[in-house]
């Protein structure tokens, strides 16, 4: 969803223009050329369908996604921490627990030797 960031930075029309010039038009030309030769254009038609969805999302936002994709976006829960942060937090917790355990052992040994 990087194009949402780019849309905010450069404006909706710039993204729409880039999508049209760099994707939709070339795919349309390829589809026309292959169709003239009697070739199979089903893959290019599928690409065109996806590009049309992207075009709608640029204008209308995430709500323009097809129902199935919208459900997946809504079901996806953002992770509060990345993998690196989770690993770091787990190591920190383990180190803290080990430090507490060592401190308890020292306290226990110190009390036992004094009796």
Image (tube, rainbow, N blue to C red):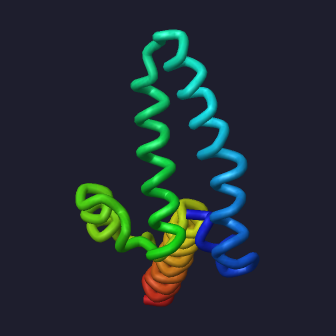
- Percent x, y for residue 95? 57, 71
Q: Residue at x 54, y 28 (%)?
A: 31
Is 41 situated above or below 7? above
Q: Nearer the viewer, residue 24 or 11?
A: 24
Number of numbered discs on residues = 0
Q: Residue at x 64, y 75 (%)?
A: 12
The quadrant of the image that shows the C terminus is bottom left
Q: Residue at x 71, y 57 (%)?
A: 18
Q: Nearer the viewer, residue 81 or 106?
A: 81
Q: Is residue 98 visible?
A: no
The quadrant of the image that shows the N terminus is bottom right
Image position of 61 (left or right of 64): right
Is 41 situated above or below 82? above
Q: Is residue 10 visible?
A: yes
- Percent x, y for residue 3? 62, 65
Q: Nearer the viewer, residue 5 or 23?
A: 23
- Percent x, y for residue 26? 66, 37
- Percent x, y for residue 107? 49, 86
Is 2 situated above or below 109? above
Q: Nearer the viewer, residue 58 or 36?
A: 36
Q: Residue at x 44, y 82 (%)?
A: 108
Q: Residue furthest front?
A: 36
């Amino acid at each position: 969803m990087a194009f949402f960031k780019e849309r905010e930075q450069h404006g909706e029309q710039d993204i729409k223009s880039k999508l049209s010039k760099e994707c939709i038009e070339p795919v349309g030309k390829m589809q026309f050329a292959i169709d003239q030769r009697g070739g199979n254009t089903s893959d290019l038609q599928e690409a065109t369908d996806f590009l049309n969805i992207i075009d709608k999302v640029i204008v209308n936002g995430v709500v323009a996604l097809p129902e199935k994709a919208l459900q997946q976006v809504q079901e996806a829960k953002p992770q509060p921490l990345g993998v690196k942060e989770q690993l770091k937090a787990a190591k920190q917790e383990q180190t803290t627990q080990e430090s507490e355990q060592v401190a308890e052992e020292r306290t226990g040994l110190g009390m036992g030797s004094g009796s």
